């Protein structure tokens, strides 16, 4: 989608929507398998897990789409896609697809869609997926819903019901793409659970040529500089995260978050106001416009639990919320709540964990 | 050189409050600002103009009030500003928005050819990151998203070299003009408005274009009609499981509260407890 719609909601509710015969031919659920430097982005597997459910509801096959340079890697990616739930894969191999570039990937994916006509196309909301999805949806003149947090099938219309948070509120909205196909959506990494990998699953591969040569492509990749992973917070894959919000009041108090995190060997997260105030770097923002996380334990201090924050962390196994307002929305979905002043609770927690860990150490 | 920068006026989300009882957002009195992501693109455009000369035109599609956002951009140093506004645009999703903006930019190009278009990486209200790629596709411009740095621009050969944020690294890319760039946040810092530009902004007569002036004759491609996506319902998020188990704070002592919490945590979630305990070694 969609800039937010303040204005008339087109009434989708009024009975069934009849698709044209031409659009009825669009069948199947596709997931774009994103890879860089020989590695598939895990969001693609998460999407296959979700895509499997959609495909089963619709009674159609689930397919992976792999674009890349010829070689062993792309075949391996197809195989992995089968292990993660795909029934088949559309494979486009060409030397010009060696690095991600908008032009050849847009042409490739658009051609595949036109040739094999899926009804749903899902991509990760990564820098690659967002770049590609926007271009492909515009080329196909179809609807695209960004950063969905929930995907379902609206059985009445046999259409994808894609939900995402609305602006600035504590509400979500569901978006449909009624008389256009395919229905496209992006989902951010870690929003959906990773499906079980079953290495006995098999599938078939459909190959399709790209039909471009290097001279056709205007943009050239001169170099790729990999990130030094050490200097970046690895929030997305952290087991324990201690997060602070505006309720911490100032950067000095925020140190209490670091103290507890250090004690637990945890990553430090934050709500958006904290990042905007510059207390921590942008990489630590948890939420809709930050990172989505799925730790075993998420400790939130001085965070109200606005929906934009919530969608980034509600996948945590256990959530502990510390907030001095008993009506704070975070208590609606946390596992444990402490109604109290974070400035005194946090040091006490750090101390208590310290003792626990010391005991565990003695017990060996 | 002629650069067009697309901007959007948005409510200042930092000042939005959720009503404590009704849980709805309180928009009243929330000041409107230029979408913060757009400012990184505007600043980059102004820097290119500083070095290479030429002209920067800012454009927005929005309600009449959006003129304030355009004036702000003039104060920062943009040369021209165009407000594309028409009731027929109401309800536009990103596909319809990119169509309207691409048409308007094509109109601008008739006056002086456009070499580069800049757009915000995303907006803080819609948050979709789709309008920039959409405009590029419709105008057949080379697309460079998530640019962290414009390394070099050569107007003779009409090539530009940039660093683009990719997953797990940075791509160094070259491409040909015309192209569309979206800048990564934090990649530069917006300059202060000069006194002269502030005066100019106050007096500046901005151009106001309706649908026809923007070169759009097919109303089926704009506004609600031109939007494939429809909002079917708005709802409150479901409770995760149930409300949080509130740790009894009667005793009041932070230390006791912490110990109560830990014993619950370790007994009710033994696996998590184990994982935490392992960290001791
Ligand atoms: C498009 C969009 C995207 C957004 N993306 C994100 C995002 O990615 N991540 C994000 O976090 N937000 C995001 N937001 C902002 C979000 O709507 C909220 O404004 C934000 O999450 C609130 O942060 P907070 O909980 O830290 O602050 P507040 O809502 O101000 O809450 C502070 C809390 O601290 C509590 N408190 C105060 N003093 C104490 C104390 N002494 N001890 C304990 N508790 C105390 C208060 O009771 C209150 O509940 C986004 C908003 C928009 C519009």
Image (spheres, coloured by chain):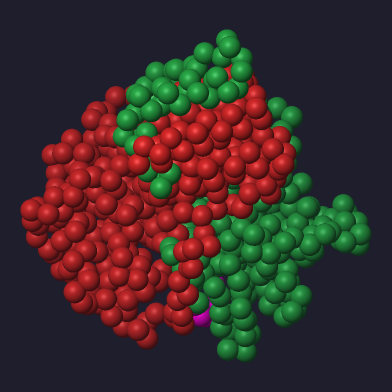
Chain colours: A red, B green
Say which quarter of the image contains residue B255: top right
Q: Can residue B94 be seen?
A: no
Rendered position, B241 above or below B35: above
Who's the residue at 72% across and 39% down the image?
A250
Who's the residue at 64% across and 56% down the image?
B38
Q: Can residue A234 be seen?
A: yes
Who's the residue at 62% across and 85% down the image?
B154
- Which of A113/B153 is in front? B153
- Residue A137 is left or right of residue B222, and the answer is left
In the rendered image, residue A58, in percent from the top left (x then y), is placed at 17, 38
- Residue A217 is left or right of residue A80, and the answer is right
Q: Is residue B174 magenta?
A: yes
- Residue B42 is left or right of residue B193, and the answer is left
Say which quarter of the image contains residue A258: top right
Who's the residue at 61% across and 18% down the image?
B253
Rendered position, A185 above or below A323: below
Residue sitting farthest toward the front? A362
The range drawn in magenta is B173-179
In the rendered image, residue B115, in percent from the top left (x then y), is placed at 61, 75
Query: In what quadrant of the picture does the C terminus of chain A appear?
Result: top left
- Which of A36/A204 is in front? A36
Rendered position, A247 above or below B99: above
In the rendered image, residue A217, in percent from the top left (x then y), is placed at 39, 80
């Amino acid at each position: 989608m969609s800039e937010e719609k303040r204005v008339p909601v087109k009434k989708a509710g009024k009975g069934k929507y009849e698709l044209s015969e031409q659009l009825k031919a669009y069948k199947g659920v596709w997931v774009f398998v994103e890879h860089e430097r020989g590695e598939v982005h895990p969001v693609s597997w998460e999407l296959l897990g979700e895509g499997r459910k959609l495909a089963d509801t619709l009674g159609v096959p689930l397919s992976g789409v792999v674009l890349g340079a010829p070689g062993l890697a792309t075949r391996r990616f197809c195989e992995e896609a089968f292990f993660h739930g795909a029934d088949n894969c559309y494979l486009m191999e060409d030397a010009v697809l060696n690095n991600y570039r908008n032009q050849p990937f847009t042409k490739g994916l658009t051609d595949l869609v036109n040739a094999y006509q899926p009804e749903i196309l899902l991509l990760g909301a990564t820098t690659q997926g967002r770049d590609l999805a926007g271009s492909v949806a515009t080329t196909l003149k179809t609807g695209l819903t960004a950063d969905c947090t929930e995907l379902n099938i609206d059985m009445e219309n046999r259409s994808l019901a894609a939900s995402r948070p609305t602006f600035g509120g504590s509400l979500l909205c569901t978006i449909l793409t009624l008389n256009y196909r395919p229905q496209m959506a992006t989902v951010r990494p870690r929003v959906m659970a990773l499906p079980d990998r079953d290495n006995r699953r098999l599938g078939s591969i459909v190959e399709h040529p790209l039909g471009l040569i290097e001279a056709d492509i205007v943009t050239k990749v001169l170099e790729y500089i990999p990130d030094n992973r050490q200097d970046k917070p690895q929030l997305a894959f952290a087991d324990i995260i201690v997060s602070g919000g505006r309720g911490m009041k100032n950067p000095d108090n925020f140190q209490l978050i670091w103290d507890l995190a250090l004690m637990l060997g945890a990553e430090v997260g934050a709500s958006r106001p904290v990042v905007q105030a510059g207390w921590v770097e942008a990489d630590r923002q948890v939420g809709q416009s930050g990172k989505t996380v799925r730790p075993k334990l998420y400790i939130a201090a001085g965070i109200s639990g606005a929906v934009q924050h919530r969608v980034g962390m509600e996948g945590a196994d256990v959530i502990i919320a510390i907030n001095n307002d008993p009506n704070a929305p975070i208590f609606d979905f946390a596992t444990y709540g402490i109604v109290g002043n974070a400035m005194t609770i946090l040091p006490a927690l750090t101390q208590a964990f310290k003792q626990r860990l010391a005991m565990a150490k003695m017990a060996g | 050189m002629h650069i067009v920068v697309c901007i959007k006026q948005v409510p200042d989300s930092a000042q939005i409050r959720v009503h404590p009882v009704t849980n709805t957002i309180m928009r009243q009195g929330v000041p409107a600002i230029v979408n913060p992501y757009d400012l990184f693109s505007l600043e980059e455009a102004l820097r290119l103009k500083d070095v290479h000369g030429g002209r920067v035109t800012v454009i927005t599609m929005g309600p009449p009030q959006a003129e304030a956002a355009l004036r702000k951009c003039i104060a920062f140093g943009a040369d021209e500003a165009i407000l594309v506004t028409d009731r027929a645009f109401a309800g536009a999703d990103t596909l319809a928005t990119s169509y309207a903006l691409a048409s308007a930019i094509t109109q601008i190009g008739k006056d002086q050819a456009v070499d580069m278009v800049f757009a915000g990486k995303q907006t803080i209200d819609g948050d979709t990151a789709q309008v920039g790629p959409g405009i590029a596709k419709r105008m057949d411009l080379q697309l460079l998203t998530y640019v962290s740095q414009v390394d070099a621009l050569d107007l003779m050969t009409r090539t530009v070299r940039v660093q683009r944020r990719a997953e797990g690294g940075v791509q160094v890319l070259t491409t040909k003009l015309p192209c569309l760039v979206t800048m990564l946040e934090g990649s530069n810092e917006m300059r202060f408005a000069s006194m002269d530009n502030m005066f100019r902004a106050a007096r500046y007569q901005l151009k106001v274009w309706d649908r026809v002036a923007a070169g759009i004759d097919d109303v089926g491609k704009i506004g609600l009609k031109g939007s494939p996506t429809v909002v079917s319902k708005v709802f409150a998020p479901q409770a995760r499981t149930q409300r949080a188990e509130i740790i009894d704070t009667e005793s009041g002592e932070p230390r006791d509260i912490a110990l109560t919490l830990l014993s619950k945590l370790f007994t009710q979630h033994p696996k998590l407890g184990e994982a935490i305990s392992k960290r001791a070694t």
